[in-house]
Amino acid sequence: QVQLAESGGGLVQAGGSLRLSCAASGRTISSYVMAWFRQAPGKEREFVGRISWSGNITYYADSVKGRFTISRDNVKNTVYLQMNSLKPEDTAVYYCAANPVAGNVWRYWGQGAQVTVSS
């Protein structure tokens, strides 16, 4: 079992930055692909991006490409989501997820962190 806990959310003005952390416990995440998702009020959950086991391959949704960066520290068992140039439409609850391979089904999820971007 892998337990995931997001932190670092909050309120920020448009154009600002935030960094979310996802701390894992229970097992090492070094053998898991890690991903970030988000869900805005009244909308379906959407994929934000993912990072490979080693951290050398990342993939992002078009809506965040060039503004968000995912990184990982397998020693600290933590994944990060650096969010720059934030827009009001980035307001959502952000979730991290883990799975042995990338795909449409993610085995482990965190509880979510609220990010609110004011205009």
Image: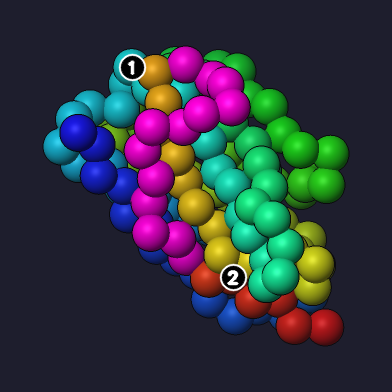
Q: Position of residue 31 (x, y in %)?
A: 33, 17
Magenta span has 108? yes
Magenta span has 11? no
Instruction: Name the residue beneath numbered marker 2.
Output: 115
Figure check: 55 above or below 96:
above
Figure check: 36 above or below 8:
above
Instruction: Name the residue beneath numbered marker 1.
Output: 31
Dividing the picture into quadrants, the one containing residue 85 is bottom right
Give how far apart the Cα atoms at labels 2 and 1 are. Answer: 28 Å
Secondary structure under badge 2? strand
Left or right, 44 with reference to 70: right
Q: Position of residue 78 (x, y in %)?
A: 34, 41
Query: What secondary structure is the stretch in magenta mostly built from?
Result: loop
Of the two numbered discs 2 and 1 on the same chain, state the one appearing first in sequence: 1
Task: Please report the bounds of the magenta region as a residue range.
Answer: 101-113
Q: Position of residue 73 (x, y in %)?
A: 37, 33
Circle 2: residue type? Val
Secondary structure under badge 1? loop
